[in-house]
Image: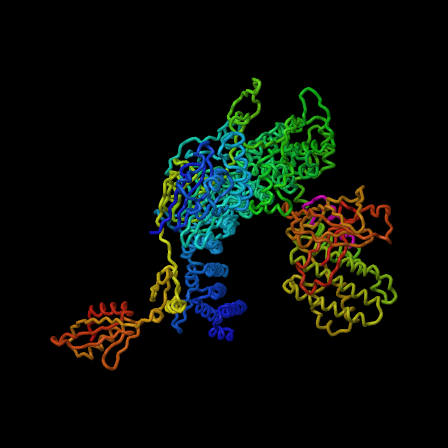
């Protein structure tokens, strides 16, 4: 550093100076603790601030921003220097002649803020001046600075220039940032629009102004289309749209009262949403969403604008606005004319848009029964136009029904086309549209006991059928006159949740408390509990994650106990070579299961990871012992011993904080004996391990709060298709893959598609990040295309080789989704130890698809 | 006094035949050269005799600039260049250059073939006229001659519409032509940088209108078309202006694509079809969406829209037809104007059963948009053209109120004179600049700084050099100018003591100057000499002789005023 400073004093070249300062900055950031160095560097920076080159000044400011002391007024009397107020120094350069230096000054100020220095309020005024700077990067940075200050001093009062009034700083800043939404540079506009969203403290009066736009035609006040639609709605008329001039302007306006340049917030979002760059529009929609979430009244107001965005020319914007609408749907009720516009989007040819809209309709509040009817009609239209949307539409109607039982009730006769006197024809049970209607009605009937009275006989029959075949869509109903089977089930559904959770807890506690049962009893208890848990998981989808997780753990324990019960331990080693198969298989399986536990569940916390690793360690010990007993000679054993001890050491280092929780456990004892083990011979180590393993107690696995099993379901291509895929060898064929991923964290980097060719060759394909959609929390949808290509097979028995045209086909197509849930809790040293196993097959493609984990 | 003179020959307090003469720093530029839709006599073209009665226009005009291809901005061009006579350069953007002749030819056909006018420009004249055109790119600075330069900015409105900045030295004028500040389905929004021109000449078609969001408009339009098509009906959309037809084509095309509709859409052959060919070529002039989509396909290669053939008219099933502009007297025009019964040839009376709906898809900036552009460009004054006088009045008042700049709205033939104060560039020698810079402490852009030097004016260029260099260059000897001043002080003590007191006083007051007491009894402050002497008549009064050179005038006069106040009483 001294060298650098010395060279700095004699250097003339500006470029070299800048680079030297850069070096000093790097040094300074490496030594954040050393106050003296920092002060010295800041001094150096201040000295060079007067340099004529912008590059040098830039670097100086950067240095000040990164190293400037946070405590104000570090006085240095010895040198007679006045208080070095970094903020003041940087603030002076806000009016530098070079825009790059101005930008650097603002950035330095922001850097100070990031490091925790409280900026002065005085900066606000300086920053406001910079908003009208000629250069976009200065304005962009200034907007950020204003936002920062407004978050620091939201409540302080600032005067409005040219009047005596005063307003809150956050309101003033909001107005200023709103003004920047109509800036000349789109970079600034995006920046401003984004920041608007996070200004939640702004008062509602200003917030509502952002959607305000007074229309005028030839100096007459004109109502906006939104206002007209609202009025027509409230007056009960429908827009004729046929009269020339029904939008004719009405009252005259006073010319003096018209304000053409909005002061502050007026119409900011109106402009932002109409911007020419879609980046700005997306930012505006996002901001709108965030503000609407915090203010219900604003949500109501911005609805019209959001609905308008559904017709944007760029799909991303449409999608974003639909998602936004879904997020704020708790606060809003759609008017009929708005619903009309929303539903028009159902005809969109993009699948993403339609599905997003279905999700939106799931959680929308509709105000009238006509609205419900309209929605149903449009959804059915959608169904006929795009039959692939079937599942999504059914699900949508399920929620629509259960949310609006009273609105559905008057529609029932019409929907079921029943007649008071005549029996009508029984509709076709396999018609997806009819099923859709039934889903709506049955879900509404769940909370509306009078509804079943309107059903005709066949409806009840259809109910029974659908309740069985589509149980996730059709709830259990209390039906009058029917057998009590269903009514017995229905009350037990709702309050079932708590007891089942209790049951889970109790059964687990029973296992943990009864540790010192005789071996036979323990095994039985474990087996029963595992069975119980598995069944529970099947019944209660919410508890499936926990139940599976616990069951897996218990299975590991069971395997361990079984392995230790083997007779071979009592017999002299060399005699029972074959018997040890079972034990080593158990060890292997425990390892597998522990990897699954670690990587296949989302929401696994550190305390569970410890237990899992502990279990794995036990399995490794078991493996070691088994190997020791079955192999002759000491040499291989020696290496294995060493490796095992390393693992123990690694375990200790990784989980040092958790060791106190592992009292009395295998590893606890192991660590006590560690010094002895290190010096003993392998044979002795094995002996010690053996006794310890048998004495070790069973660790209690604390249940994590939120645990879900990661899973993937391949919707397309469906397994066992009748049409085998044919392609010419050597050429490429594209295959559409559609899969739903549940509870997979960061799927963009962890999920891969594996194609298994009949000859056993496997190909890994990494889908593009854009192929993943995120329709809801914890869920992802992978829609991608996989390219298949293969040379001709010669040595694989094929079902029906067709040598005539050179194409090959086969009966079943193999495809697997491979999840690579890597590195989450693994230290770098462990990553190379890769294990990969095939896991349980996925429902939809029973034989061919498999889920594999590699770590 | 330098000045900018602006005279509208057309479009002054009027819409149509835009033609504005601008004189700036001795250069004469004609902005646009349009025709008027409302007249069929001589008034349809601007009165070029205003420029010169005899002699060729080329001698009087340095260049002509055409903002876009609409006829009210370029319709008089062949008449002007070929029939009146102009051989200078005509500047326009590439798309304008491509589409303009099609429109001119169409206009000529209607005037000559349909209305049978004689003495109209011919096809050959259009061709000859287009040969004089120089095409410019966006943001390209074109040097018309050594001093005059022009630069085009994007204006929205129609394909190839541009705003032009005309600049001579430090004086500049921006002419907007027609522009649109809200982007539409195929064009972006007008944009200009903070060029701070002396004058901004802006259109003001919608001076008193603030428009509703374009989304409502588009939604209404699409909904109406969609409903009619779903019912199995036929939709006719007569579109007035070229450019708007493309806008609706894109709107319908994307909607058809989005909604997977199958009904055919037709547009009229002829003008729209020909122009569409050029729309396909100038993708860089369109908006973000079309430019992005171009990677996959050209959005003007319509999938659902085809050229119309009369044979399709009786095809069953729904369809959408865009027949183009309905000229007065046609059946279309009658229906549009609200007639419910039509008399056909052969005295057949037809009842109009179709529904007629009206929608506005204008591509002009509204009042807010105009204000926004003025805000962006930050001009020193604004001039309104291309609008009605009454509406302009309102906007003028608003502009003056909001931006505190002068605003003009001349009628046709009326000249506006704008005094300007152009800045004159002066070269400064680097040595002098560095020396003066070194003296200052921190740079402060806001504060003016005093700088000593000599201004040399030689062959109309100005240089600022240090006085030594100036002397050397001019071969002059240096003279020194000294000021001396006597200050009387009442002090009974001896001269030396007085000098001592003066020294200590100055030392205490002038902290940042070098104050010295010389052995000969005199005091110096920097280069200023102060000597104390006894008054010849009154021994109780001492005379202080203060002497300084011209360069130290500031400090010297300060010192004398300080000494005149007298010395402070000695504390003892």
**Where does the image place residue B341, in percent across and percent down from the top left?**
54, 20
Name, please, the residue furthest toward the right.
A575
**Where does the image place residue A144, in percent across and percent down from the top left?**
48, 54
B449 or A572, nearer to the observer: B449
**Is-magenta flag for residue A533?**
yes
Quadrant holding the C terminus of chain A? bottom right
**Is-magenta flag for residue B212?**
no
Residue B527 position by quadrant: bottom left
Residue B169 appears in the rendering: yes
Is residue A96 depicted above or below A317 in this figure? below
B545 or A679, nearer to the observer: B545
Name, please, the residue furthest toward the left.
B537
In the image, what residue occupies the spot 29% across and 69% down? B551
Name, please, the residue furthest toward the top.
B347
Magenta segment: A523-546
Scheme of colours in the image: rainbow
* Main secondary structure along the magenta-highlighted residues: helix
Name, please, the residue furthest toward the bottom.
B519
Residue A33 appears in the rendering: no
In the picture, measured across the screen, residue B429 lies left or right of residue A755, that is left
**Where does the image place residue B139, in percent across and percent down from the top left?**
50, 51
B325 or B28, nearer to the observer: B28
**Where does the image place residue B292, in percent across and percent down from the top left?**
60, 47
In the picture, measured across the screen, residue B473 lies left or right of residue A755, that is left
Is residue A63 depicted above or below B243 in this figure? below
Q: How many marks?
A: 0
């Amino acid at each position: 550093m001294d060298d650098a400073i010395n060279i700095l004093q004699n250097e003339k070249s500006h470029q070299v100076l800048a680079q030297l300062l850069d070096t000093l900055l790097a040094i300074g950031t490496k030594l954040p603790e050393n106050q003296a160095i920092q002060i010295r560097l800041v001094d150096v920076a201040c000295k060079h601030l007067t340099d004529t080159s912008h590059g040098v000044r830039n670097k100086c400011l950067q240095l000040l921003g990164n190293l400037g002391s946070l405590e104000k007024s570090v006085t240095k009397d010895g040198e007679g220097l006045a208080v070095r107020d970094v903020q003041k120094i940087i603030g002076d350069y806000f009016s530098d002649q070079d825009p790059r230096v101005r930008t650097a000054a603002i950035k330095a100020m922001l850097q100070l803020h990031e490091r925790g220095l409280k900026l002065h309020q005085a900066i606000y005024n300086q920053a406001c001046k910079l908003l009208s700077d000629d250069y976009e990067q200065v304005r962009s940075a200034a907007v950020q600075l204003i936002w920062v200050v407004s978050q620091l001093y939201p409540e302080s009062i600032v005067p409005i220039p040219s009047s005596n009034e005063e307003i809150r700083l956050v309101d003033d800043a909001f107005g200023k940032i709103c003004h920047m939404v109509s800036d000349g540079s789109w970079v600034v506009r995006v920046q401003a629009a984004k920041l608007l969203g996070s200004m939640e403290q702004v008062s509602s009066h200003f917030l509502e102004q952002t959607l305000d736009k007074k229309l005028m035609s030839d100096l007459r006040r004109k109502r906006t289309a939104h206002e007209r639609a609202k009025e027509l709605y409230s007056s009960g008329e429908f827009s004729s749209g046929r009269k020339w001039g029904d939008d004719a302007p009405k009252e005259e306006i006073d010319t003096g009262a018209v304000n053409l340049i909005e002061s502050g917030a007026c119409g900011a979002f109106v402009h932002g949403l109409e911007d020419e760059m879609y980046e700005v529009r997306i930012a505006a929609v996002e901001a709108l969403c965030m503000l609407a979430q915090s203010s219900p009244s604003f949500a109501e107001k911005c609805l019209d604008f959001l609905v308008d965005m559904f017709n944007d020319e760029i799909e991303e914007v449409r999608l974003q606005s639909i998602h936004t609408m879904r997020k704020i749907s708790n606060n809003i009720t759609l008017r009929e004319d708005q619903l009309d516009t929303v539903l028009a989007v159902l005809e969109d040819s993009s699948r993403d848009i339609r599905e997003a809209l279905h999700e939106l309709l799931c959680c929308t509040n509709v105000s009238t029964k006509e609205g419900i009817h309209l929605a149903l009609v449009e959804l059915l239209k959608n169904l006929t136009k795009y039959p692939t949307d079937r599942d999504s539409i059914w699900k949508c109607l399920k929620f629509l029904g259960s949310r609006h039982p009273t609105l559905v009730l008057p529609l029932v006769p019409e929907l079921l086309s029943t007649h008071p006197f005549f029996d009508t024809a029984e509709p076709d049970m396999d018609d997806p549209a009819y099923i859709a209607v039934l889903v709506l009605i049955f879900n509404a009937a769940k909370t509306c006991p009078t509804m079943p009275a309107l059903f005709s006989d066949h409806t009840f029959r259809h109910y029974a059928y659908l309740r069985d075949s589509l149980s996730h869509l059709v709830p259990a109903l209390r039906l009058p006159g029917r057998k009590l089977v269903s009514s017995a089930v229905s009350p037990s559904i709702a309050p079932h949740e708590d007891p089942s959770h209790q049951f889970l807890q109790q059964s687990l506690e029973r296992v943990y408390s009864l540790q010192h049962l005789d071996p036979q009893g323990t095994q039985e208890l474990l087996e029963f509990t595992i069975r119980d848990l598995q069944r529970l998981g099947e019944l209660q989808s919410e508890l499936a994650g926990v139940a599976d997780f616990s069951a897996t753990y218990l299975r590991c324990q069971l395997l361990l106990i079984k392995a230790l019960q083997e007779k071979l331990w009592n017999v002299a080693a060399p005699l029972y070579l074959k018997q040890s198969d079972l034990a080593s298989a158990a060890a292997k399986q425990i390892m597998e299961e522990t990897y699954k536990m670690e990587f296949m569940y989302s929401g696994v916390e550190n305390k569970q990871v410890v237990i899992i690793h502990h279990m794995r360690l036990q399995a490794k010990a078991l493996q070691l012992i088994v190997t020791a007993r079955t192999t002759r000679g000491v040499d291989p054993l020696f290496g294995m011993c060493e490796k095992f001890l390393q693992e123990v050491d690694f375990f200790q280092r990784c989980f040092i904080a958790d060791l106190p929780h592992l009292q009395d456990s295998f590893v606890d004892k192991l660590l006590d004996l560690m010094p002895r083990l290190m010096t003993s011979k392998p044979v002795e180590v094995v002996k010690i391990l053996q006794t310890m393993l048998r004495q070790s107690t069973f660790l209690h696995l604390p249940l994590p709060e939120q645990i879900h099993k990661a899973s993937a379901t391949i919707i397309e291509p469906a397994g066992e298709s009748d049409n085998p895929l044919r392609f010419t060898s050597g050429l490429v064929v594209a295959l559409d893959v559609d899969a739903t991923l549940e509870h997979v964290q960061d799927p963009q980097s962890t999920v891969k598609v594996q194609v298994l060719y009949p000859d056993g060759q496997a190909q890994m394909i990494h889908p593009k990040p854009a192929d993943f959609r995120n329709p809801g929390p914890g869920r992802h949808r992978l829609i991608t295309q996989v390219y298949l290509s293969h040379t001709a097979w010669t040595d694989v028995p094929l079902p029906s080789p067709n040598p005539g045209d050179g194409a090959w086909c086969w009966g079943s197509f193999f495809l697997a989704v491979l999840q690579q849930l890597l590195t989450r809790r693994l230290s770098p040293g462990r990553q190379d130890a890769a294990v990969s196993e095939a896991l349980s097959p996925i429902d939809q493609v029973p034989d061919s698809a498999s889920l594999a984990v590699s770590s | 006094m330098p000045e900018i003179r602006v005279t509208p020959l057309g479009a002054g307090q009027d819409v149509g035949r835009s033609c504005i003469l601008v004189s700036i720093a001795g250069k004469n530029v004609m902005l646009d050269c349009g025709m008027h839709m409302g007249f069929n006599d001589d008034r349809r073209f601007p009165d070029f005799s205003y420029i010169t009665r005899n002699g060729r226009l080329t001698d009087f005009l340095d260049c002509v600039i055409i903002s876009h291809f609409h006829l009210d901005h370029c319709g008089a061009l062949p008449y002007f260049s070929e029939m009146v006579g102009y051989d200078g350069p005509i500047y326009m953007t590439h798309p304008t250059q491509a589409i303009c002749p099609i429109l001119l030819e169409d206009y000529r056909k209607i005037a000559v073939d349909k209305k049978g006018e004689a003495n109209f420009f011919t096809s050959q004249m259009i061709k000859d006229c287009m040969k004089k055109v120089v095409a410019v790119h966006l943001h390209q600075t074109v040097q018309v001659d050594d001093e005059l330069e022009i630069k085009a900015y994007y204006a929205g409105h129609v394909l190839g519409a541009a705003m032009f900045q005309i600049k001579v030295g430090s004086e500049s004028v921006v002419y907007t032509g027609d522009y649109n500040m809200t982007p539409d389905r195929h064009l972006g929004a007008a944009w200009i940088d903070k060029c701070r021109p002396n004058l901004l000449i802006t259109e003001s078609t919608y001076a008193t209108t603030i428009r509703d969001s374009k989304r409502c408009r588009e939604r209404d339009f699409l909904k109406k078309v969609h409903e009619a098509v779903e019912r199995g009906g036929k939709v006719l959309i007569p579109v007035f202006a070229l450019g708007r037809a493309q806008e609706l084509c894109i709107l319908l095309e994307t909607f058809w694509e989005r909604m997977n509709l199958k009904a055919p859409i037709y547009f009229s052959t002829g003008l729209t079809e020909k122009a569409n060919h050029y729309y396909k070529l100038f993708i860089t002039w369109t908006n973000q969406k079309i430019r992005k989509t171009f990677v996959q396909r050209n959005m003007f290669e319509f999938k659902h829209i085809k050229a119309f053939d009369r044979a399709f008219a009786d095809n069953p099933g729904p369809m959408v037809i865009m027949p183009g502009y309905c000229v007065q007297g046609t059946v279309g025009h009658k229906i549009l104007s609200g007639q419910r019964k039509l008399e056909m040839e052969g005295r057949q009376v037809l009842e109009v059963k179709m529904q007629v709906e009206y929608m506005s898809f204008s591509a002009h900036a509204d009042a807010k948009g105009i204000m926004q552009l003025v805000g962006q460009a930050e001009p020193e004054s604004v001039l309104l053209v291309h609008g009605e006088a009454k509406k302009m009045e309102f906007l003028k008042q608003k502009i003056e109120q909001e931006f505190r700049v002068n605003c003009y709205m001349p009628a046709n033939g009326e000249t506006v004179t704008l005094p300007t104060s152009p800045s004159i560039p002066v070269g400064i020698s680097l040595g002098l600049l560095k020396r003066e810079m070194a003296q200052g402490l921190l740079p402060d852009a806001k504060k003016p700084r005093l700088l000593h030097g000599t201004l040399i004016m030689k062959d109309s260029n100005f240089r600022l050099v240090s006085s030594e260099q100036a002397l050397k260059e001019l071969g002059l000897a240096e003279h020194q100018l000294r000021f001396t001043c006597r200050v009387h002080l009442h002090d009974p003590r001896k001269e030396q003591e007085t000098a001592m007191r003066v020294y200590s006083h100055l030392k205490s007051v002038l902290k940042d100057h070098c104050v010295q007491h010389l052995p000969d009894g005199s005091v110096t402050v920097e280069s200023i000499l102060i000597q104390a002497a006894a008054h010849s008549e009154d021994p109780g009064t001492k005379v202080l002789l203060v002497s300084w050179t011209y360069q130290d005038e500031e400090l010297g006069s300060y010192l004398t005023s300080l000494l005149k106040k007298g010395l402070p009483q000695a504390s003892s």
